[in-house]
Image: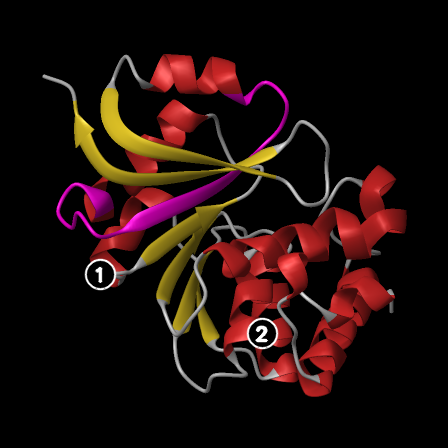
Amino acid sequence: MNASLERLPNGLRVSRETTEKLQHFAELFRKWAKSINLVAPSTMSDLDSRHIVDSMQIYNLFPGPKRWIDLGSGGGFPGIITAILMSELEDGWVHLVESNNKKAAFLRVALIETGARGSVHPVRIEDAPKLVEHCDAISARALADLPQLLNYVSPWMLEHAAVRAFFHKGRDYQQEIDKAVGRFDFDLVKHSSVVEKDSVVLEIAHLSRKQ
């Protein structure tokens, strides 16, 4: 396991037990990825920094025992990583929304074997608000463009002003922002990625639809 997993971005330390859980997750991931497509094969050799540490920065931006919803959880980034990090607190919860049954099965195994604080909902994103009505934060990675993401999160964010959303985005993120502001009003903070140059995490708050 890469030594970079011994601490979060910006120097926030994690326990040895949590580091071991992250290591076990990485081993599970590599095993399952041989039979189902969890991430692009070209990124598997850089799993620690490209996916795990990249996901860890989300928790660093909004730490504490929060109630998270992770949309399109796929291979567990960032949802499983957030759930593992919260296991140190013995509080908080991550609701992982993943409609693909094979990926949902992987996520369940990962939660059980790492003792992470989360549960899996094998439903379409549009149906998730019926199952999880309230949250503190929402995350998504490599799921959709920003306008579509804001449509997905609107059932939670339009009703509750305190909810924040965190989206990983690559170098073309400004084009997505420009499209989104034509449909929504929102507060935006751009956090530079600790892993990839020119990439960001977009933090969204106070979402409303334009009339």
Q: What secondary structure is found at the residue carrying circle 2?
A: helix
Q: Which residues are magenta?
A: 157-173
Residue occupying the point 45% across, 87% down: 90
Q: Is residue 42 magenta?
A: no
Q: Is residue 12 left or right of residue 89?
A: right
Residue 38 in sight: no
Q: Is residue 160 magenta?
A: yes
In space, the residues marked 1 and 2 are separated at their CA atoms by 21 Å
SS of the residue under disc 1: loop
- The quadrant of the image that shows the C terminus is top left
Q: Is residue 189 above or below residue 174?
A: below
Residue drawn at (58%, 37%), measured in percent from left and top? 142
- Percent x, y of residue 204: 35, 38
Check disc 1 and report the residue beneath it.
134
Measured as percent of width and height from the top left, residue 82 is found at 53, 65
Q: Residue at x 59, y 82 (%)?
A: 112
| Up-down relation of residue 194 to residue 82 (above or below) | above
Which labelled disc corresponds to residue 84? 2
Q: Residue furthest left?
A: 211
